[in-house]
Image (tube, rainbow, N blue to C red):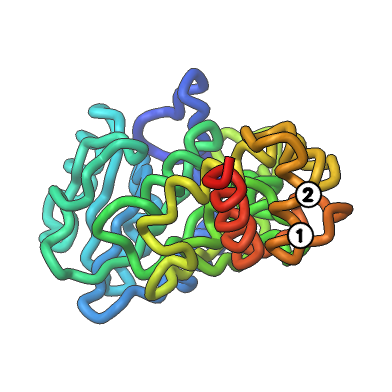
Amino acid sequence: MPPSRLPGPRPRKALGQHFLSDSGILADIAAAVLAPEGGLVVEIGAGTGQLTGVLLERGYEVIALEVEERLADHLQRRFKDEARLHIVVADARTMDLREIVPPGRPFSVAGNLPYFAANPIIRHLLEGEPKPSELVVMVQREVAKELAAPAGDSSLLSISVQVYAEAELLFNVPPEAFDPPPAVVSSVVRLTLRPEPLVPPQRLAPFFELVSKTFRNPRKQIHNALARGIWLPKDGAPEALQAAGIDPMRRPETLTIAEWLLLLDACESVVARG
């Protein structure tokens, strides 16, 4: 039996809103949050405050981000006596966390991410400053599978995440847990931030340029994908692959981040020699 309709503002179809209303799943998400010392959680897309309330019940201090003024007003009324809640009207794709998280304060991120904005939100949180210790977020199941893809089955998205964090798919959430039910199954994932990115900061831009251009042809063998994806002198792709110790018959999705870095060095050497 689907959960009853939530009180408060209605979801807006134009914004792809689906408010999670299953109390058991809300509790599971809150329990999955392993907030660091200090107990601060930044919640993305607080909506009508269902997860907000459970996080507060667990003793966390919550900074609730909500892009819609009408929902922020509802949160203010619903939690008017809660001193541990700070409501911020902001777009999670572009917000500056330095303006809302106290300097030096460790924090976790939690939330039910809008399907259409999940990828840019995750990238923004992983690449920006300050960085959270973890993200416990709900996304479309297919996106969750991609985020937590095993070695040998990478995509541009999974590599973008692996550079900064370890991904773990926690559990699935059926459509009937939402008001209104979406047309797809959702999943909750945990992204645990690494102490340092796997790619040195000064190498991030050329690394992602190489990976993104090569992944334009992910099903082609790496020698073809590389030759078509980036500019190299004639016969430069085989030379670079040989220097990096990578079998030219492999496909881009099978390469590890360490191998991409070796390939980047080799490609730059080939280009430098002209």
| Residue in the image at 69% along x and 62% along y | 244
Describe residue 193's horizontal placement relative to residue 128 as left or right. Answer: right
Q: Residue furthest front?
A: 273
In the picture of the structure, the residue carrying the numbered disc 2 is 238
Residue 115 percent coordinates (x, y): 55, 37
Describe residue 40's horizontal placement relative to residue 149 as left or right. Answer: left
| Residue in the image at 46% along x and 73% along y | 31
Mark 1–mark 2 CB contact (< 8 Å): yes
Q: Is residue 239 visible?
A: yes
Asked if 76 appears above or below 259 in the picture, the reply is above
Q: Secondary structure at mark 2?
A: helix
Q: Which mark is residue 260?
A: none
Residue 125 percent coordinates (x, y): 37, 51
In the picture of the structure, the residue carrying the numbered disc 1 is 242
Who is closer to the viewer here, 222 or 254? 222
> Label 1 amino acid?
Gln
